[in-house]
Image: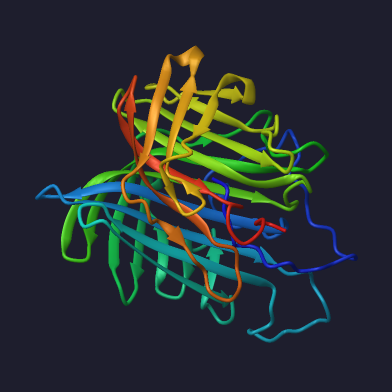
Amino acid sequence: MLAASAVVAWASTDFLWRQALPGYNYQFPRDHFEHEDFRTEWWYYTGNVVDEGGKRFGFELVFFRQGVPPGAENRSAWSLKDAYLAHAALTDATGNRFFSEERLNRAGPGIAGASFAQRRVWNANWSVQWGQGEVQVLDALTPKFRFHLELVPEKPPVIQGENGVSQKAEGKGMASHYVSFPRLRVGGTIDSHKVSGTAWMDHEWFSNTLAPDQLGWDWFSMQLDNGTELMLYRFRLAGGGVDPHSSGTFIGKDGKARHLASKDFTLTPSDTAMHGKYPVEWRVRVPSLGVDLLCRAVVKDQELKPKGGSVGYWEGAVDYSGSHKGVGYLEMTGYVGGSPLR
């Protein structure tokens, strides 16, 4: 997944971060955790669940790590090496309500971090703890909502892109290393509701930002009722077109992934179904797969509005209908408040 408002512009002309380059040798479970030689990293969880009475929720829990170029030696536990931002959100689809919270911390003496040794990513009392067999336990407590969810992979992780990288723009290093769990079985509680359903997890790490002519992106996850999944994204250009580095992935019932180039699909926003500047209804077509879908937000207002001047973005639960049926998440950035990752 791509993410917005997570990056603080830390200027550096002296320090060189590692670049996301083809041929990367993925090693699991190690690569599910921190990569501090890359500038930016995130762990993204989104899902659709229902309680025992049929009440539906969407949930999001995201952890961002932003590396800070090293300066003068500072051995204090409070020295700023990495900044950690986290977003948690809850969509009450039945009640047509949306809630979101954020927090920003430095690592400090264990306040926030990502650790392979601990098999954990956390920001204060929000966390994901990895257990046996890649089970991932999510916890978030906010003044507005809380959840405790156990996520069990139903398919193996998928490496997105080609030759180990998801290329985002023309040029060396204009890419990310990108791994997804496309279908996780969910059980647990949201507030007092016992829930079950499915989730999607994305993990990306990279060092370069968007190209100058890329205004933002539209990202779709799709968990279809026939047991397959799709991830598609497009970069919008300043001239009104779509960047040819837009791409996606189809995951079959057997878990095998197939890369999709920008020419393989179309994502067409509705100019009538809107929430402010955000189109909340889309037509999704992948002709080679026989996919022709209507993507519709379950709640129109699912915009995250971070504090402190960060760029806002829309991210929320959606339904798919048409040639197939399913659920997923939609993320839209760069529509309001300037471009992300600048």
Q: State the residue in front, 193 or 272.
A: 272
Q: State the residue in front, 87 or 304.
A: 304
Residue 186 percent coordinates (x, y): 28, 47
Residue reaching furthest front? Answer: 272
182 lies left or right of 57: right
Where's the C terminus, which quadrant?
bottom right
Query: Which residue does the image show at 41% across and 42% down from the upper left?
Result: 273
7 lies left or right of 281: right
Residue 299 percent coordinates (x, y): 32, 51
Residue reaching furthest right? Answer: 14
- Which image quadrant is residue 159 in? top right
Residue 259 percent coordinates (x, y): 58, 24
318 up-or-down from 115: above or below = above
- Which image quadrant is residue 96 in? bottom left
Residue 198 percent coordinates (x, y): 30, 42
223 up-or-down from 337: above or below = above
Tell me how the rendering is colored.
rainbow
Numbered disc total: 0
Q: State the residue in front, 310 or 33.
A: 310
Query: Which residue does the image show at 46% across and 28% down from the upper left?
Result: 284
Where's the N terminus, which quadrant?
top right
Query: Which residue does the image show at 60% across and 36% down from the upper left?
Result: 234
145 up-or-down from 278: above or below = below
Query: Which residue does the image show at 65% across and 42% down from the upper left?
Result: 177
